[in-house]
Image (cartoon, helix red, strand yellow):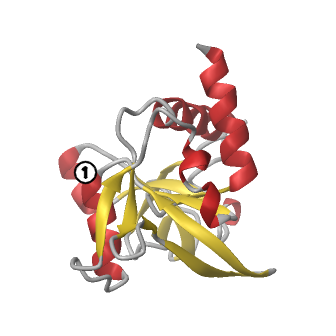
Amino acid sequence: MSIDITMKKNFRPGMLVEIETEEDKVRDTVTRGVIVKVLSKGNQEKGIKVELDTGEVGRVYSVPTKDEMRRETFKFYNTFFFLPKIYSVWHKKEKKYYTLAYPSKSGHEKTAFLFTDKSEGERLMEMMNLSATEHMVKEINRKKFIDENFKTLEVDTYRIDLNRKLTADKLKELEQYFKNMR
């Protein structure tokens, strides 16, 4: 079932949509994000104008279906678990991976960070003001399961590239599932 992108009543804040911004028209791409605000006053033939959580403004191009989202998630994890290099932030003095007590609804979760690219880890270090003398982005051991690299730290959740969150149990389950497929 497709959603009519010309009708304002079909869109609410919190929906995931693909929009076409002015920059996207030049590059012939679309931007995906969550609607923060519907800007159109009424129905529009060109598509409803919305503002995303990233601050970008554009007209709705399409709404991803649940099947598309599942397919993308499956593809991501299938490639992620077979990457030759996965990175995390290493605390040099304590000689262990950096974890953070991340606030959640149930209190604080001990969170470890995983990155598909070394530059993403360096970006986190800048955002968190972690000094390069005490911390570094280090490759995790791929001969073991990811969770085994962090087992002494009792990690509750993992954040992958800062935009995906998995509990330790779910990460272990997914990694075993994908490894057993081959």
- Return the residue found at the far left: 26
Horizontal and vertical percent position of residue 159: 54, 61
Q: Amino acid at mark 1?
A: Lys
Q: Quadrant of the N terminus?
A: top right
For residue 154, which quarter of the picture?
Answer: bottom right
x and y, in percent, of residue 178 in the image: 62, 26
Q: Residue at x 58, y 64 (%)?
A: 43
Q: Is 161 left or right of 11, judged from the image as shown?
A: left
Q: In the image, what residue occupies the spot 47% across and 37% down?
A: 80
Q: Residue at x 38, y 65 (%)?
A: 89
Bin the neighbour count of mark 1 within 10 Å (Cα to Cα): few under 14, some 14-19, many 20 and up: few
Quadrant for the C terminus, please. Answer: top right
In percent of the image, x 73 and y 38: which residue is there? 173
Q: Quadrant of residue 34?
A: bottom right
Left or right position of 118 against 50: left
Instruction: Work out whether 87 lies above or below 82.
Output: below
Mark 1: secondary structure: helix
Residue 143 shows in this picture: yes
Front residue (pair 169, 98):
98
From the viewer's side, name the closer residue of 74 and 36. Answer: 74
**Where 120 falls versus 146 (above or below)?**
below
In the image, residue 101 above or below residue 19? below
User: Disc 1 designates what residue?
Assistant: 25
Residue sticking out furthest to the top: 182
Name the residue nearer the viewer: 1 or 9: 1
Counting from the top left corner in percent of width and height, residue 2 is at: 67, 39
- The answer to whether residue 41 is visible is no
Exactly how many numbered labels are in the figure? Answer: 1
Side of 118 where 151 appears, left or right: right
Picture coordinates of residue 132, whole percent (x, y): 22, 77
